[in-house]
């Protein structure tokens, strides 16, 4: 049986998700969901959704999220999967 393409199960987006979660930090340097939500002008649930499934977020929000997390530009660019779909 053929399987349909499902954006939430596409492993190519996991690299970006792991990068964003990694820069969120841990311990004293951990950035709270509230702080990220304020930086993006969205709810904490939306931030969680963007972190788990970055392919569903508008590009401008992902760029703001990466900026709020101080992700280096080169690492950010290398983690993005480009597609013609």
Image (cartoon, rainbow, N blue to C red):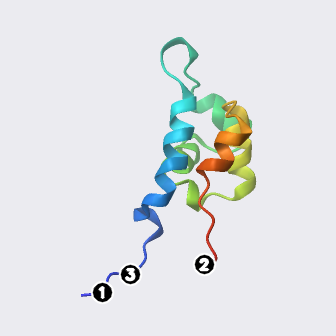
**Pointer 2 local density, CA inside 10 Å: few below 14, some 14–19, many at least 20:** few
Residue carrying label 2: 85
Q: Is residue 44 above or below residue 5?
A: above
**Mark closest to the chain's N terminus, 3 or 2:** 3
| Label 2 secondary element | loop
Label 1 sits on residue: 2
Proximity of marks 3 and 1: CB atoms separated by less than 8 Å: yes
Work out how far the residue at label 2 is from the one at label 1, CA to CA, in angstroms.
19 Å
> Marks 3 and 2, Cα distance to the nearest angstrom?
14 Å
Question: Which image quadrant is residue 34 in?
Answer: top right
Asked if residue 9 lies left or right of residue 64, the reply is left
User: Circle 3 is placed at which residue position?
Assistant: 4
Residue drawn at (65%, 34%) of the image: 36
Closer to the camera in the image, 46 or 67: 67
How many other residues sit within 10 Å of disc 3, few (<14), some (14-19) or many (≥20)? few
Q: Quadrant of the C terminus?
A: bottom right
Nearer-the-camera pick, 51 or 44: 51
Please tell me whether mark 3 sits on a helix, a strand or a loop. loop
Q: In 3D space, how far apart are the residues under numbered discs 3 and 1 (Cα atoms)?
A: 7 Å
From this view, report whether residue 69 is shown above or below residue 60: above
Residue placed at 63% from the left, 65% from the top? Answer: 82
Q: How many marks?
A: 3
- Toward the top, the furthest residue is 28
């Amino acid at each position: 049986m053929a399987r349909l393409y499902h954006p939430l199960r596409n492993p190519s987006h996991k690299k970006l998700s792991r990068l964003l979660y990694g820069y969120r930090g841990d311990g004293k340097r951990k950035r709270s969901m509230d702080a990220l939500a304020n930086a993006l002008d969205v709810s904490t649930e939306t931030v969680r959704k963007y972190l788990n499934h970055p392919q569903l977020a508008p590009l401008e929000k992902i760029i703001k999220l990466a900026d709020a997390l101080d992700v280096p530009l080169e690492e950010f660019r290398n983690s993005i999967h480009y597609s013609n779909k």
